[in-house]
């Protein structure tokens, strides 16, 4: 579904035949139209393909081609045959009346549409204006545009929606026409001529008590557009993050991809070469001639700690590496005429290399740095990392090396000026906060004043609210500031995402220039004087990762790929008169086009999808704002017709209670939290009763509410007694209380907050349908929660009310956070868990915060994964984005299966039993603010079970012994929101045995909550994040030596799962939906780098009969115990697997298999004694002991009785079969069917008398269930 514009009025809809390309629609009302009336003012009109559509506010009237549909409430439409015009005459002064026209434009072409009409205004008691508006729709050949008529509402165009795949987009904002006369308007349409295309024109009165007006001579014509030559796109197949240019008998493009592949491309888009390098991201690319032959070499600063050098064909020349710290910047500087490579990264050092890669010199920042850190537990002052390296060239041929420094994501840094190979800078310029409102993520250099030296232009990396461009003029050593957020405040652009501002210089006329700042999906054209009032902003639908000016033509810009998973390099020619139109109407080819097409297929398949009768998914609670962005009809269809998802009323942050209750008399004895406040969101203004009363009205007409009740800076917005009263006033409706950004305080001060606030509130919430949604910072649920002050939560005391959720902004270890929450859920410490998706989840590196994805495909796949894993409480930013709204239907219709925890069968039997965290393990997640933590000696001598989580490891490889490598399949600290876990998800959970286990915990044993298959097969390895610790707590093992033991155990245990999935970046979850069915969810795991994937499903303990995609009906075949399933680019597959035999059914056999730790496959012979496990169950054997084969049948010669024993299971029946020949002949039955009637689980004896008069007879016992 696309973005839609909605409106209120009475509508006349006319679907006209296709006309020629010049005149699309024309009507002078010389003949009387046929009118079709709806029943009343709250009815809806559907336009488009026939089909069932409905809405809660009234029935739907369907408009076919050539019909006009009018609501008969409050207005009298009149065809004036004398004047040949269409009149609207009001008979109800309380209505804002109007009408509209839908016009088929499937024969039109891309270009300009001209709209003209005449208006005559009747007399009125007040008001003189008519509102009119225009929008474009498409796909009405397969779907419907739904117009909701609510005449008492304001007369803006605010209430149109779409169904069944149709789409609508506003052409222009609502316009006002004053008085009588003729009017005309031109608008540009970037897509046209498709089946189902239409435009719509609407008119409505401005004021209630006006009388009416008439419309005549409506003409819409179409002028084909000239080609938009201002922007060209070239698909590379890669998500391109950086673009540069290099010289080789002319200039060509050098680009670096998400996975670190470097490629060469001709300016015309011809691919020249690729080099995969290390497989890890490059943080910088630099092109320069190192050999003097006039051809540039290419240098890459790689996250695995190397500088790579390639020749002009992409071939490797040399590499340089001294340690594992990431390399962040590289350039080439000349001393006299000798080139040297200067490079630096996050080990706080600057290196000089020869042109052939030999090490020349190392300069540690501690010898000269003036950078400082701040706050508690900060790294030392007087050290920094290299953010950017630039070369200042002078007219005499000399050069200076310019180092821009950083200590963290809020660091403004310094410029350090070095003569080539000098040990110390000769000049330092501090970037003062008065000239930089955020840290810097981009830097370019241009000589704009013509003095022979370049000025530096730096762009911010962060929230739009602090976005800026900082200019530094080295000649005068002066800074100037352009506040991007001020420029946005003067323009109607509303997003607030995290972006990198990327300023370059383009020519303006013949003698001037403009600053062009690429800022997400906006381009700001800033005059030389950097005046915000005269800045022009051009908006596109997509954001781009990088921009570079073309060296041969600075008016041409080279753009990297779109941030939403794009795969193109683009040339934007600002010298072409069509460039702004081309940029504003940009529709990407390549991967994004495929994603959109794949998503359209899902929408189409959902229309006919029927949930399998045997599935019973759990409900999902979405915390959704009331700003529906035109999705009203869709939203109400979900809430009125489906039980899930449950749309909670999202309130955000309401006013807070005054702080005068924080006294010793009220038990508030902690001084640290007594004075803590969270300002800037809402005020501390309300009495206790006022605070209670502000919530109560919001429960009306909704299933419940969700709101902030505190924040990590100040959890105590309301007194505990206040919160309890708010819950009580909900009268049983759901109350979700959010505490964002909590858990960062691991001190004893937070123990007070738990005891004073959270424990009493959670206790009250337990039995009152309320949820404490603890939205902690990323390390909480795998580290800090295992400190003693969290023991009451870990015990399961608050399992019904306390929901572990996360703020994963900036995290590089999302694979661990899902393992931590799953472990708490499966253990019984919590009965639900929560997830969240926000823009800055897409940023793993604060210095390069590219988090302005406009197509929320990564959000969608992440949400599908979390929900398929069992997350029920989803708190998404942009939840009402039209693209994301498909998630509503996936849940509502049951295509996305939401399992109970006891249904999940894709958890590896091996898990980490988490003990109180080692300070280094816990602290590395809390060091996000600074990036100067790297200590080479400490790293070499302290191998950790889990490490490299801090921002200084952005994009770096995990160690060979890191849990993430061998458990989740992660190779780097980056964006593993969709982890592969090829051996099944390996949980991080409370210890269940030994010295660390809480044997008195309310939750009981973890296996009591899990699928029955896990009852006796779980294996625990304890760790504090640094060491592996023995079960009795007496022995520690280092990660670099013991990890193979754990890794091998995980790999071996995977064979006990019914199936596993491999094939690279494919996230997966499997749940049992019935005794004979498994539901497998497969997801493209490239969070920001989507690709078409191939999943190999290996069947370990089950045998499939059919393997079917429940959405599109594709049937996959298994061969040799495995099946290959393609996963569409940017999407997912929902697979139903029908089994040949029941898997752990809810009966005696299922209990038997669970008790003995069997695979659940009836044909498996676990102990290799010749009797299958099912047979052991039936006759009382022990499937894990080859010497115990149970009570074998026997034949009593004297009585001719065949005697056998069967377990007391009333699902069993038996036949004694006979045959006189083992080789030939048919087996016959000897007597009647014997049905077991007992359910006691004990062996019972049965006798069958056999006729022994024949020469020979063979007997066998056949047992069925």
Image (cartoon, grey):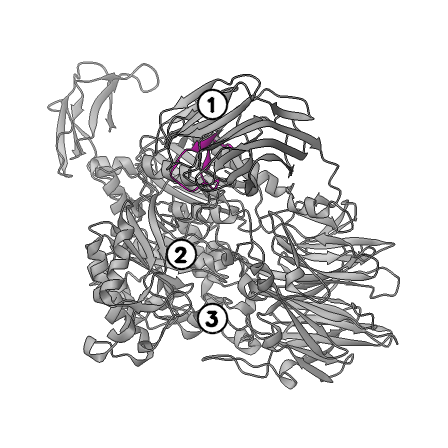
Left or right: 585 in relation to 122? right
Q: Position of residue 20 (x, y in %)?
A: 68, 22
Q: Nearer the viewer, residue 672 or 222?
A: 222
Q: Which mark is residue 819?
A: 2
Q: Which mark is residue 78?
A: 1
Q: Which mark is residue 924?
A: 3
Who comes first in sequence, dot 3 or dot 2?
2
Who comes first in sequence, dot 1 or dot 3?
1
Left or right: 1243 in relation to 913? left
Q: Would you identify the image quadrant in which residue 917 lies?
A: bottom left
**How far apart are the two marked residues, 1 and 3, measured between alpha carbons?**
74 Å
The image shows a total of numbered marks equal to 3
Report whether residue 334 is seen. yes
Q: Nearer the viewer, residue 1134 or 1201?
A: 1134
Verify CB contact (< 8 Å) between mark 1 and mark 3. Answer: no
Left or right: 413 in relation to 1048? right
Q: Would you identify the image quadrant in which residue 1200 lies?
A: top left
Verify CB contact (< 8 Å) between mark 3 and mark 2. Answer: no
Bounds of the magenta segment: 145-166
**How far apart are the two marked residues, 3 and 2, measured between alpha carbons?**
18 Å
């Amino acid at each position: 579904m696309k973005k839609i514009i909605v409106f209120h009025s009475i509508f006349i809809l006319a679907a006209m035949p296709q006309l020629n390309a010049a005149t699309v629609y024309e009507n002078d009302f010389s003949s009387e139209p046929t009118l079709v009336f709806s029943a009343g003012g709250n009815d809806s009109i559907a336009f488009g393909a026939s089909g069932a559509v409905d809405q809660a506010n009234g029935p739907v009237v369907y408009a076919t081609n050539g019909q006009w549909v009018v609501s008969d409430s409050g207005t009298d439409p009149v065809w004036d045959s004398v004047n040949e015009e269409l009149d609207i005459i009001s008979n109800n002064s309380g209505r804002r009346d109007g009408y509209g026209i839908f016009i088929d434009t499937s024969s039109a072409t891309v270009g300009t549409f001209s709209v003209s009409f005449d208006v005559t205004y009747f007399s009125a008691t007040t008001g003189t204006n008519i509102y009119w508006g225009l929008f474009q729709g498409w796909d009405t050949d397969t779907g419907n545009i739904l117009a909701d008529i609510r005449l008492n509402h304001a007369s803006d165009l605010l209430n149109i929606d779409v169904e069944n795949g149709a789409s609508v987009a506003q052409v222009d904002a609502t316009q006002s026409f004053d008085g009588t006369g003729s009017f005309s308007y031109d608008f540009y349409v970037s897509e046209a001529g498709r089946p189902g295309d239409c435009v719509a024109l609407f008119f409505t009165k401005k004021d209630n008590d006006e009388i009416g007006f008439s419309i005549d001579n409506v003409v819409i014509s179409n002028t084909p557009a000239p080609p938009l030559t201002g922007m060209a796109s070239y698909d590379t197949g890669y998500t391109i993050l950086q673009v540069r240019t290099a010289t080789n008998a002319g200039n060509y493009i050098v680009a670096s991809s998400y996975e670190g592949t470097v490629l060469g491309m001709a300016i015309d888009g011809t691919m020249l070469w690729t080099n995969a390098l290390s497989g890890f991201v490059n943080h910088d690319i630099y092109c320069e001639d190192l050999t003097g032959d006039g051809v540039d070499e290419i240098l890459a600063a790689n996250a695995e700690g190397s500088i790579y050098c390639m020749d002009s064909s992409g071939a490797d020349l040399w590499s340089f590496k001294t340690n594992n710290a990431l390399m962040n910047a590289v350039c080439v500087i000349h001393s006299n005429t000798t080139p040297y490579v200067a490079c630096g990264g996050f080990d706080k050092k600057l290196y000089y290399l020869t042109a052939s890669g030999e090490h020349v010199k190392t300069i540690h920042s501690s010898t000269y740095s003036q950078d400082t850190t701040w706050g508690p537990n900060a790294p030392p002052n007087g050290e920094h990392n290299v953010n950017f390296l630039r070369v200042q060239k002078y007219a005499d041929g000399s050069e200076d090396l310019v180092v821009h420094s950083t200590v963290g994501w809020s660091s403004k840094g310094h410029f350090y000026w070095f003569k080539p190979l000098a040990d110390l800078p000769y000049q330092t310029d501090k970037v003062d906060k008065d000239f930089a409102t955020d840290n810097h993520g981009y830097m370019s250099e241009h000589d704009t004043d013509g003095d022979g030296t370049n000025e530096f232009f730096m762009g911010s990396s962060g929230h739009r609210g602090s976005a800026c461009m900082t200019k530094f003029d080295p000649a005068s050593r002066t800074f100037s500031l352009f506040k991007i957020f001020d420029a946005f405040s003067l323009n109607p652009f509303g997003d607030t995402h995290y972006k990198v501002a990327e300023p370059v210089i383009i020519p303006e006329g013949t003698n001037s220039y403009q600053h062009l700042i690429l800022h997400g999906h906006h381009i700001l054209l800033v005059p030389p004087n950097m005046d915000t009032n005269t800045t022009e902003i051009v908006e596109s639908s997509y954001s781009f990762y990088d921009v570079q000016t073309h060296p041969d033509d600075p008016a041409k810009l080279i753009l990297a790929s779109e941030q939403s998973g794009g795969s193109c390099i683009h040339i934007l020619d600002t010298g072409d008169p069509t460039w702004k139109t081309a940029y504003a109407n940009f529709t990407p080819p390549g991967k994004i086009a495929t994603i959109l097409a794949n998503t359209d297929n899902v929408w189409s398949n959902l229309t006919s999808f029927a949930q399998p009768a045997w599935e019973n998914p759990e409900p999902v609670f979405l915390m959704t704002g009331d700003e529906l962005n035109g999705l009203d009809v869709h939203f109400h269809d979900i809430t009125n017709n489906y039980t899930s998802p449950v749309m909670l009323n999202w309130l955000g942050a309401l006013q807070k209670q005054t702080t005068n209750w924080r006294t010793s008399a009220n038990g508030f004895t902690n001084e640290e939290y007594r004075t803590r406040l969270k300002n800037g969101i809402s005020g501390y203004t309300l009495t206790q009763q006022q605070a209670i009363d502000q919530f109560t009205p919001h429960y009306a007409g909704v299933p419940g509410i969700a709101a902030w009740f505190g924040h990590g800076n100040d959890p105590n917005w309301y007194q505990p007694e206040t919160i309890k009263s708010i819950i009580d006033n909900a009268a049983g409706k759901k109350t979700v209380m959010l505490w964002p950004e909590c858990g960062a305080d691991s001190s004893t001060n937070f123990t007070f907050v738990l005891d004073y606030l959270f424990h009493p509130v959670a206790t009250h919430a337990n039995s009152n349908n309320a949820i404490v949604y603890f939205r902690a910072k990323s390390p909480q649920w795998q580290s800090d929660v295992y400190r003693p002050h969290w023991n009451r939560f870990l015990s399961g005391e608050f399992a019904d009310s306390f929901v572990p959720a996360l703020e994963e902004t900036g995290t590089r270890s999302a694979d661990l956070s899902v393992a931590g929450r799953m472990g708490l859920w499966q253990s019984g410490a919590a009965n639900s868990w929560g997830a969240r998706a926000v823009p800055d989840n897409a940023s793993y590196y604060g210095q390069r915060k590219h988090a302005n994805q406009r197509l929320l495909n990564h959000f969608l796949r992440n949400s599908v994964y979390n929900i398929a894993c069992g997350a029920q409480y989803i708190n998404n930013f942009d939840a009402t984005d039209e693209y994301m709204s498909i998630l509503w239907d996936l849940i509502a219709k049951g295509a996305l299966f939401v399992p109970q925890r006891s249904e999940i069968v894709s958890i590896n039997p091996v898990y980490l039993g988490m003990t109180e965290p080692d300070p280094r393990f816990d602290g590395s997640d809390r060091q996000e603010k600074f990036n100067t933590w790297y200590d080479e000696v400490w790293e070499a001598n302290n191998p950790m079970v889990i490490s490299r989580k801090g921002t200084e490891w952005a994009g770096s490889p995990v160690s060979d012994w890191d849990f993430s490598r061998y458990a989740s399949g992660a190779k780097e600290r980056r964006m593993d929101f969709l982890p592969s876990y090829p051996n099944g998800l390996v949980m991080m959970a409370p210890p269940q045995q030994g010295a660390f286990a809480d044997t008195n915990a309310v939750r009981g044993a973890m296996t009591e909550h899990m699928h029955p298959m896990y009852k006796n097969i779980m294996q625990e390895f304890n760790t504090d994040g640094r060491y592996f610790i023995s079960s009795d707590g007496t022995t520690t093992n280092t990660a670099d030596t013991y990890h193979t033991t754990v890794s091998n155990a995980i790999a071996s245990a995977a064979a006990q799962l019914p199936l596993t999935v491999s094939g690279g970046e494919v996230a997966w979850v499997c749940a049992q939906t019935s005794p004979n069915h498994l539901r497998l969810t497969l997801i493209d795991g490239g969070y920001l780098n989507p690709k078409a994937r191939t999943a190999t499903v290996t069947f370990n303990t089950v045998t499939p009969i059919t393997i079917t995609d429940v959405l599109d009906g594709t049937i996959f075949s298994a061969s040799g115990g495995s099946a290959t399933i393609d996963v569409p680019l940017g999407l997912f597959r929902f697979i139903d697997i029908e089994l040949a035999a029941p898997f752990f059914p809810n009966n005696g056999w299922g209990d038997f298999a669970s008790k003995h730790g069997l695979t659940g496959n009836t044909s498996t012979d676990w102990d290799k004694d010749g009797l299958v496990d099912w047979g052991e169950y039936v006759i009382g054997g022990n499937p894990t002991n080859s010497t115990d084969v149970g009570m074998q049948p026997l034949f009593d010669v004297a009585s001719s009785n065949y005697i056998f024993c069967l377990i007391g299971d009333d699902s069993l029946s038996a036949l004694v079969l006979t045959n006189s020949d083992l080789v030939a002949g048919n087996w016959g039955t000897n007597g009647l069917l014997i049905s077991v009637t007992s359910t006691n689980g004990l062996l019972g004896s049965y006798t069958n008398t056999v006729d022994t008069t024949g020469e020979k007879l063979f007997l066998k016992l056949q047992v069925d269930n």
